[in-house]
Image: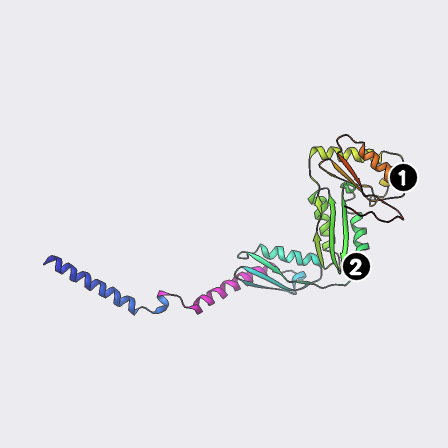
Amino acid sequence: MIWSMRNSRAALLAATLAGVLLSLPQAALCQSPSSNANASTQANNTVGSIAAARLDKKEFHDVKVSVDNGTATLTGTVDLYGYKADAEKRVHKAKGVTAVRNLIEVAGPTIPDEVLKDKLGEKLEYDQVFYGNAFNAISLSVHNGVVTLGGHAYCYFNSKDSALALVSYYPGVKDVQDEIQVDPVSMFDDRIRRQVYRAVYGFPSLNRYAIDPGKPIRISVQNGHVELYGMVDSQADKDIAFLRANGVPGVFEVKNYLEVANQPTEIRK
């Protein structure tokens, strides 16, 4: 008798719960697609507002931001390539942004490639003149306003970053390709740098290349391997620089890329 009453109560409770569940609105059991879409749109708008707030500066007044599932897309125009790069960095730090598509176009003046190359070359020659620029050998090429920097830099902060910043904020530059190699930092290479410098510039016929800080014989050292860059007046100066560098203890090899004035440029391998 007791068992029968217990079963009846259990059956009654189950029936009651079933009735309650059936009476609940469908939205309470499963969110509708429209609710999910609204929540997603609201989240995108919120993140977009946060990202846009990071671009509240006059150089970004023509830049627009849209966000879709954490990916921010930047559109519009800026006057300098450096502003385009800055906009991407700023938005990437916005809360909720996981990726950035940078579709910003660089407006500003259009300068012929050869003219732009000459102007930038002059700037780079005298960049970091008080920070050992004789140890930087940064190359430069320009095609349709796109600047490619290559060659070697002595360090990131005082050499590579400085060169990239100088080019990025120059009018007429539409894009910057960074192919600069930073030479290894070690006590061994630093010793060789100093000794090669003294050996080259300490020779009477070569010390005049230190007079103009923008046009030195440039010395790059990579794990004991030395490369010479720059422009000299004669083949004799080029040969002497090679012999002097090659005579420094600990140097494994010297590649002589020095160019001689009024002679064809040697192709770097």
**Would residue 50 be counted in the magenta stretch?**
yes
* Coordinates of residue 48 in the picture (x, y in percent): 55, 62
How many circles with numbers are drawn on the protein? Answer: 2
Q: Residue at x 69, y 35 (%)?
A: 186
Point 79% across, 57% down: residue: 116
| Residue found at x 76% / y 43% | 136
- Stretch in magenta: 29-56
| Residue that label 1 marks | 236
- Label 1 sits on a secondary structure element that is helix
Q: For mark 2, does the 10 Å Cα neighbourhood hold few (<14), some (14 to 19), or many (20 or more) residues?
A: some
On the picture, is 4 further left or further right than 69?
left
**Residue at which label 2 appears:** 113
Q: Nearer the viewer, residue 169 or 11?
A: 11
Q: Main secondary structure of the magenta part?
A: helix
Would you identify the image quadrant in which residue 32 lies? bottom left
- Relative horizontal placement of residue 138, taking residue 96 as reference (left or right): right
Nearest to the eye among marks 2 and 1: give it: 1
Q: Identify the amino acid type marked 2.
A: Asp
Secondary element at tag 2: helix
Three-letter code, disc 1: Ala
